[in-house]
Amino acid sequence: MNRSGSNQSASRSNGSSHTNPMEYTSTGESGVVRTCLCGFEVVVRTSWTNSNPGRRFRGCPGDNGSYCRVFQWVDPPMCRRAKEIIPDLLSRINDQERQLNEYRQSNFKKAALESKLLTYRLMAVVVGSDVYLRNMIPSFLRC
């Protein structure tokens, strides 16, 4: 799940946290990676590994799930305390979201059953009314 609120942020598919500080071919004036080895403009992503939770990095945008080795951290390293707390908080959030989705799904099923039951009740009322009305009409007026 993407916690940063940005469509460009996502963790790498292989979940690696990259230990090499910088591997790139083209940098801007300030040493910021601009393009990757594939020739694409790099994107900013967010790492959700336990060793770098929520830490942003620049890297290859990837083509069909493959990435070149261009990589550069955007954010400074996390302190030890943040590395301990953030994964647990993310786990709690994911558990709450899972429980909420299960609740919504069970309520959706319940609402569908209640709707079906109401339909059957209405059909019973209509059929019952029709039988009642047939008995009220004199036989000589019936078709």
Image (cartoon, grey):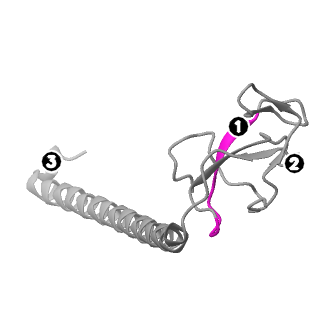
Query: Is the residue marked by circle 3 packed among few (<14), some (14-19), or many (20+) residues within 10 Å?
Result: few
Q: Residue lying farthest front?
A: 30
Asked if residue 126 is among those painted magenta in the image, a careful observer would answer no
Is 47 magenta? The answer is: yes
Location of the C terminus (image quadrant): top left
Separation of residues labelled 3 and 2 (CA atoms): 92 Å
Q: Secondary structure at mark 1?
A: strand
Residue type for callout 3: Phe
Give the labeled residue for mark 3.
140
Q: Which residue is mark 1?
A: 43
Residue bearing mark 2: 69
The residue tagged with tag 3: helix, strand or loop? Answer: helix
Tell me if residue 14 comes above or below residue 6 in the rendering. below
Mark 1 or mark 3: name the one nearer the start of the chain: 1
**Alpha carbons under labels 1 and 3: distance apart:** 84 Å
Q: In which quadrant of the rendered view does residue 110 lie?
A: bottom left
How many residues crowd around disc 2 within 10 Å: few (fewer than 14), some, or many (20 or more)?
A: some
Task: Say which amino acid is labelled 1.
Answer: Val
Q: How many marks?
A: 3
Q: Nearer the viewer, residue 46 or 99?
A: 46
Residue 88, image x, y percentages: 49, 74
Above or below: residue 83 compared with residue 64: below
